[in-house]
């Protein structure tokens, strides 16, 4: 009987239905990967969240990147008990000769290396000592065609400043810094139009639990420099000169890296995880309807055969058989489709077609997303088939 | 389903228009002129005397600069940097340079940047050795400058003096900075590239457009689902009608007429769904958008709209796929006997 049942299935029609399930799963997975990837990319613009890294920036600033704070805070921070490392940074945006924008981040390389692990893929890393040298992240290098040895003219988008720097290396950090160009602190200050005693923000690494966030912001909030350990502080300060008063933040906040970006997203861009999920749901609704149509058609195409088998007493078995076939095959098609969706999003990302601002969206995929998109597609397919089967007259 | 495809496209268009609309429009008054055929700034060579004559009395200030790589030697220490020849008085004024000491008055004098001075422990009136284009020259440091700019790590010299130092480059410069309203066309005709500085609008437009293109790439996924659904919806409508078509065939309707019946049914259904879908899509996107603007306290917003190309894309692709969806049942009907 089972073999007879298998014979009545029109496999070409089933293949078509499975292709639709696979396409729908691919689209759902594609959308899920991009939406989660976008949120993850924006949230991790500063660093991968490790829990013990805080960002110090101006309390009234729209984001850490747009903040302006005094470099004197560096000395206060580095002298605090529980602070392991501090990295002052200046964020500016410049146009390349081909008019493409790039984030140019001024850093003290040795301080930043306490927070981010850099793998030099080509050439060398900047030492912060030479004004006209820069290194570029692997994603920016691919997207913008920047290579070691290139001399590039950087034009600040905010001021009339320009500078030609030589790219001395390409690095990979597995963070959003891969979409940026790193230059010595002074170069970014020049491009951003900041005085030498001002930076955008500071990363602070604390030894776990020793230094609560409130203590950190409280300590730097009052202002006033404290003489710190001679090593790094004096080296950074020695590169910079006159400390003149400017329009800098007088109040600071200390937040987790991801938290500060998420607050920026919800406060300034008005986006949150729910809005990303709403797009996923929108696409999923469309996919559900498509799978429903396809499954109903599959059953309608077999209506005559099913009616004949039902009339000779094979009611239960034919329903179970068809449902089992649909479940197994749609689950397989769903998994394949989800993988295709992920590969598709990865391909678009690798080719620079998915950007948020100047940053490449890195699609996010895990076993949960894979199983969810495949499972949901097959469940919808199963339910639609069952409903269609039940609707057939006995 | 059509509405589902229309909503993200319309909201995306509105965001682009909104952001483009609120973007400040800057008029450029600061330009950089380099040789159009030069790959990099350092490769650029311009005949300044020719360019200078062309733009005389045009109400623009120009700051010609000849930049060469050089090696600065002080005692046993040396450092590779740039030698910049320029009309220093006007350049210092333009760049708000503060100077300790004096501006170079003759060919044996230079100014050095504060970072370079600290690096090589150079003081005013010290003598330094400069290696330019393979030749070594001794200079007296007339002053140390500070401008919080790249000059802080360079050696600066009067333009006429650098021309005397490198006779091959007499009358030539690497770049010219212009301040004022510049007629770029004339310079471009002379083989120059005019680069506007402070390109805020240009940069922000690029960033907004790249993000918008990402949203559109994303929306294409939604459109793909909708278009596939159009095909299957049409197919289902026609398959559902097969019983009725069989009855019509039994009472004598020809194959051609039954085929046309199915074709028109699919066509009318698709046109109606496109019309209703687009209307619902625009209305619901406006409702969602206005509601979100109120909830999120966005002060100004532009209601969602569809561009003609979006409208054409959604309408044409949906109609075509709907019609294609009606073809298998029509073929099936044409093969059956009455």
Image (cartoon, coloured by chain):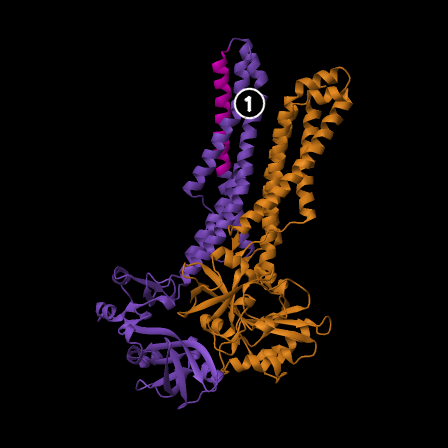
Chain colours: A orange, B purple
Residue A323 to residue A51: above or below? above
Q: Position of residue A338 (x, y in %)?
A: 63, 42
Mostly what secondary structure, the magenta segment?
A: helix
Q: Report crowding for label 1: few under 14, some 14 to 19, many 20 or more residues within 10 A (C-alpha).
A: many
Q: Position of residue A171 (x, y in %)?
A: 56, 63
User: What residue is at 62 percent from the left and 74 percent from the top?
Assistant: A86
Report if residue A284 is visible in the image: no
Q: Is residue A372 left or right of residue B240?
A: right
Residue underneath mark 1: B238
> Looking at this view, is B132 or A20 the one in front?
B132
- The magenta segment is B253-278
Q: Position of residue A64 (x, y in %)?
A: 56, 67
**Magenta stretch holds residue B210:** no
Location of residue B88 (image quadrant): bottom left
Location of residue B1 (image quadrant): top right
Location of residue B335 (image quadrant): top right
Q: Name, please, the residue furthest toward the bottom.
A: B125
Residue A113 to residue A33: above or below? below
User: What residue is at 63 percent from the left and 62 percent from the top?
Assistant: A48
Give the quarter of the figure containing the C terminus of chain A: top right
**Magenta stretch holds residue B274:** yes
């Amino acid at each position: 009987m089972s073999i007879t049942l298998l014979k009545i299935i029109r496999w070409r029609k089933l293949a078509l239905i499975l292709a639709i399930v696979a396409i729908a799963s691919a689209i759902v997975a594609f959308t899920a990967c991009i939406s989660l990837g976008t949120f993850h990319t924006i949230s991790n613009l500063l660093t991968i969240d490790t829990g013990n890294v805080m960002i110090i920036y101006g309390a009234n600033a729209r984001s850490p990147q747009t903040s302006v704070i005094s470099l004197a805070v560096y000395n206060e921070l580095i002298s605090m008990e529980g602070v392991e490392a501090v990295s002052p940074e200046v964020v500016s945006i410049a146009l390349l000769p081909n008019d493409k924008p790039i984030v140019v981040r001024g850093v003290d390389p040795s301080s930043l290396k306490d927070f981010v692990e850099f793998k030099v893929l080509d050439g060398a890393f900047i030492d912060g000592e030479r004004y006209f040298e820069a290194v570029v992240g692997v994603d920016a290098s691919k997207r913008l065609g920047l290579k070691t040895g290139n001399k590039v003219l950087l034009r600040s988008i905010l001021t009339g400043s320009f500078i030609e720097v030589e790219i001395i290396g390409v690095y990979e950090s597995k963070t959003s810094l891969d979409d940026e160009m790193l230059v010595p602190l002074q170069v970014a200050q020049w491009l951003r139009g900041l005085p030498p005693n001002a930076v955008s923000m500071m990363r602070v690494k604390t030894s776990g639990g020793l230094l609560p966030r409130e203590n950190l912001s409280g300590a730097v909030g009052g202002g006033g420099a404290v003489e710190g350990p001679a090593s790094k502080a004096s080296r950074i300060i020695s590169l910079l000169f006159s400390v003149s008063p400017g329009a800098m933040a007088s109040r600071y906040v200390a937040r987790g890296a991801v938290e500060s970006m998420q607050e920026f997203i919800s406060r300034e861009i008005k986006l949150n995880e729910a809005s990303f999920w709403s797009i996923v749901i929108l696409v999923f609704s469309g996919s559900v309807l498509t799978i429903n149509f396809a499954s109903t058609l599959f059953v309608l195409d077999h209506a005559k055969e099913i009616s004949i088998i039902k009339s000779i007493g094979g009611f239960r078995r034919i329903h179970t058989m068809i449902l089992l076939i649909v479940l197994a095959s749609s689950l397989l098609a769903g998994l394949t489709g989800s993988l295709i969706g992920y590969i598709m999003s990865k391909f678009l990302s690798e080719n620079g077609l998915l950007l948020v601002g100047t940053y490449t969206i890195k699609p996010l995929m895990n076993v949960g997303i894979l199983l969810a998109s495949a499972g949901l597609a097959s469940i919808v397919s199963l339910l639609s088939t069952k409903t269609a089967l039940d609707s057939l007259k006995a | 389903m059509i509405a589902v495809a229309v909503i993200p496209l319309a909201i995306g268009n509105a965001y682009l228009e909104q952001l483009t609309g609120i973007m400040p429009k800057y008029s450029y008054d600061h330009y950089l002129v380099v040789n159009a055929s030069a790959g990099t700034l350092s490769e650029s060579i311009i005949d300044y005397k020719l360019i200078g004559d062309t733009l005389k009395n045009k109400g623009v200030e120009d700051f010609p600069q000849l930049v060469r790589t050089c090696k600065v030697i002080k005692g046993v220490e040396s450092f590779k940097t740039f030698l910049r020849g320029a009309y220093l008085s006007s350049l210092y004024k333009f760049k708000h340079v503060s100077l300790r000491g004096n501006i170079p008055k003759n060919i044996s004098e230079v100014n050095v940047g504060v970072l370079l001075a600290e690096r090589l422990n150079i003081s005013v009136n010290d003598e330094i050795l400069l290696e330019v284009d393979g030749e070594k020259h001794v200079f007296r440091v007339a002053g140390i400058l500070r401008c919080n700019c790249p000059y802080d790590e360079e050696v600066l010299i009067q333009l006429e003096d650098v021309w005397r130092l490198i006779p091959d480059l007499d009358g030539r410069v690497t770049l010219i900075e212009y301040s004022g309203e510049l007629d770029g066309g004339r310079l471009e005709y002379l083989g120059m590239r005019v680069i506007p500085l402070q390109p805020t609008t240009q940069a922000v437009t690029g960033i907004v457009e790249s993000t918008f293109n990402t949203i559109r790439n994303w929306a294409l996924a939604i459109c793909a689902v909708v278009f596939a659904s159009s095909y299957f919806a049409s197919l289902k409508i026609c398959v559902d009608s097969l019983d009725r078509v069989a009855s019509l065939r039994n009472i004598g309707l020809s194959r051609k007429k039954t085929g046309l019946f199915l074709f028109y049914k699919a066509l009318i259904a698709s046109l109606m769904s496109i019309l209703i879908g687009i209307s619902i899509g625009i209305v619901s996107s406006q409702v969602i958008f206005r509601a979100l603007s109120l909830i999120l306290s966005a002060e100004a917003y532009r209601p969602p709209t569809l561009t003609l190309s979006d409208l054409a894309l959604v309408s044409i692709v949906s109609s075509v796929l709907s019609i294609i969806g009606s073809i298998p049942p029509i073929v099936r009907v044409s093969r059956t006997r009455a």
